[in-house]
Image (spheres, grey):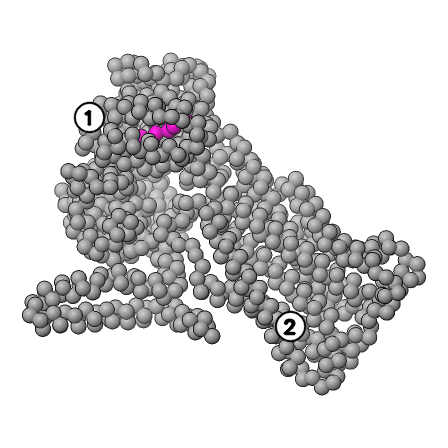
Amino acid sequence: MLWVQRFWLRLQTLFGRNRSAERLHDEIQFHLEQQIAENVAAGMSREEARYAATRAFGNPTVLKEETRDTWGWIWLDQVAQDLRYGIRLLLLAQQSRKQAELWRFSAAEYFDIARLHQSFDGFFAMHYWTATLSENLERSENPERVVVLRVTSNIFALDGISTILGRAFTPDEDRPGGPNVAVISHRLWNKRFVRDASVVGKIIRLNGIPYTIVGVTPRRYAYWGADVAIPLRLDPASNNRSERNLMVAGKAKEGLAVEQTGPALAELAHRVEAEYGAAYPEYAGLFYKPIDVRRGVAGDFRIALYMLMGAVAILALVTSANIASLLLARTMARAGEIGTRLAIGAMPGRLARQFLTESALLSVIAGAIGFVGGACALKPLGALIPARYVWEETDLRTNPTAFALSISGALLLGVLFGLAPALFVLRRGVGTNLQQRRARSVTDRYGGRMRTGLVLLEMALAFVVVMGAGLMVRSYRRLTSMDLGFQPDHVLTMRIALPELKYADPGQVANFFRELLDRVRALPGIVDVAASSVRPVDAAGARDFSIPGRSLNTATGIDKAGYRVVTPEYFAVIQTPLRRGRSFAEQDGPNAPHVAIVNESFARTYFANEDAMGKQIRLENRYISTAVGMEWPGSDVVQIVGVIGDSQQITPFMSVHDLYNPAAPEIFVPFLQHPEGGRDMALLLRTETEPGTLTDPIRRQVLAIDADQPVYEVQTLREMTEIAFGPTRLCLVILGIFAGAALVTACVGLYAIVSYSVSQRTHEIGIRMALGAKQRDVLRMVVGEGIPVIAAGLVVGLFAALGMTRLMSSLLYGVPASDGATLLAVSAILMATATLAVYIPARRAIGVDPIEALRYE
């Protein structure tokens, strides 16, 4: 068959990918050399001939990539790339005795760590930057906002990544005063430059600054979510340890776990504290904390994947038990037929082949139906996966390999569980099988015990899956009904970042957003509009602060809180309540006294036994981290004029258990008094109509003010809040689907065993009824055989569920893993459905005509 040949070829390709890649390279080089030789013979120089051949032949790298895509199982290469990238890669955080955990490092601190060779192959530093990408200074062509990663040049060597076009930037380019070069991602090369092989050497502009593209990375590799990498150009002579804006990551040596790197980092931290502790009091009790990158990025979604695999495994077991039970009953029902055929001379091998053919035919049909059902469900299920967990170039689709695996799995199960009972019956011999035909009222004890055990296993496994689904239902209901502290419905958001070269003066920034807000407010369907440096569901910016005349409980007397620059309408748009004082007004301009609003958490933490209203805060300029990497110049003393309610920070990288933590302290300042902090702002619009319909009108208003200015990260606030609930929602749907399938499968198995028992005991039932047995007596007898199986399955499933559901505790919110209400509900559901599966054949049994039953053979 053709598909078998293709499947075999793909297997050969899978296990010989390296050899295939070498042959492909050799073949391409052969054709290139042939074309070059022909050009030289036509009178070209060797160099001209090579360029002409390359132009005619096409980009060899692209050709290789497209050819590898046709080999099948390309996802294996992609997974291998992901594993090579993620394995042994660790992020670092630093923390001291009196200071919260910090993810940022100064250049001097990075060089301290970079010299650590014990336990590590090396370290690299990075700093995020968002910029407007254009290709023409005079007239921006399709400007777009991109995430740029300033990074040390050794990131490529540590990741083991080679560019598919051009090269990576060099250590010489990663020094102060080095040239402006950039390496772009495969995604950006594909989307913006349409896989142009001549992109190397092209000039692009980031916020108007020219950079030369020197390379393109492989597919499915991006710099920590960025599309462009440029040299970080750190100064090794820097001795400023307070300006912390770098993230640091390292690669552990082969074979070392995260925990095994601790001693080397502890020794380094002790050395840094001893050497610099006098000048930097925050180093008191310093320690460095390594964090597995894969665990930090995947978060709760990793648990969701484990739940998916567990649900698949349990459903596979339930299905296997059901197949075994049904085929065993089917084979035992044909024992008399088998005995008769053996008695008249049929060969056991011929009968075994017949059973094998029947099982294989059923398996192929079932596998094909399952494949079609899976293909139809793939897209809807894929849409449930939160976008941040799925790489943009990932293509979820079916292929011949998946079809072959589906058919093979079904065929294996069908043949295994169909042939085994057939062989058992054949080995029993003619006499035993004929005896069962003559005495059908006597059920085969061995087969009965096996079928009962299999159904008990199905009920227990179904209990585990249904219990998991029940916990996820209750947890998701708690999540979606919780008070967030703001109202996300009918709010559209988008970000706008003004380049510093074009908007150098803070007054220009203020004028741009003032005009934009006036234009947008006049659009139909807009209730109100505001701007904020950080949205309610973004990773909050932070700023150092102190309280005049008061020493905070830190080594330096300075602490850190969430920090947002907002326009006066911000709290009205997101509908966060004002508890005390007043909100911002247009009068809070640059010449008015500087003011601030804090949340209740800030007031409780820093003014526990007094009224926060009227108190002063000094906004410091030591260590700052914001969502967009901006820095706030100078310190400023502000007076608290209002206190707002706390809001829950639903950030993309949060864990469900973070919702148990109290809200973090936050400081809000008016935009007109701090326009330098609003160069990258988010618009928030409360609408009367569907928010998504207003995206284009707002974009047109932005372009009317500045034709080169893109908007980006366009989302509704409701969509953003649901991102954090993604893993929980995904587990809910997955477990719900599998719970339903497991429950139906288990009940089908229970129905089959009871139905088979009724058919075997038809003659016995007729005798009982002929002797005066009532219908309720027969009903009680039949149902009584199924109820013990149900009860035993529930008991076994209960204990199994108590252990299994603890593994999903990190995905539960407000619901314990051993929730009593869920246990009772699941037990009732399983008991009701299983009893129905028993009652249907029992009801059929009491309808048997005694006369017909006595004749039954």
Q: How far apart are the two marked residues, 1 and 2, measured between alpha carbons?
A: 82 Å
* Quadrant of image for the C terminus: bottom right
Mark drawn on residue 597: none
Question: Could you classify mark 1 by the number of other residues whose Cα lies within 10 Å: few (under 14), some (14-19), or many (20 or more)?
Answer: few
Q: Secondary structure at mark 2?
A: helix
Q: Secondary structure at mark 1?
A: loop
Q: Please tell me whether residue 241 is drawn above or below residue 56 in the rendered image.
A: above
Viewer-nearest residue: 79 or 258: 79
Rendered residue at 37%/61% (across/down): 74
Residue located at (53% from left, 64% from top): 368
Q: Position of residue 226 (x, y in %)?
A: 30, 45
- Identity of the residue furthest to the right in this view: 771
Is residue 805 shown above or below 543?
below
Judged left or right of residue 120, residue 325 is right
Question: Which of the 4 image quarters holds residue 732?
Answer: top right
Q: Which residue is mark 1?
A: 505
Position of residue 224 in the picture relative to residue 432 (left or right) = left
The image quarter in which residue 412 lies: bottom right
- Front in this rendered view, residue 538 or 834: 834
Q: Position of residue 118 (x, y in %)?
A: 31, 52
> Residue flagged by tag 1: what amino acid is it?
Asp
> Contact (CB < 8 A) between labels 1 and 2?
no
Question: Residue 250's x, y, as percent?
Answer: 32, 49
Question: What kind of secondary structure does the magenta stretch mostly adopt?
Answer: strand
Q: Which residues are magenta?
A: 681-686
The correct choice, above or below, for 244 with respect to 179 in the image is above
- In the image, 658 versus 741, the foreground residue is 741
Left or right of 37: which side holds 485?
A: right
Which residue does the numbered mark 2 point to in the structure image?
420
Q: Residue at x 57, y 66 (%)?
A: 365
Residue 543 in sight in this render? yes
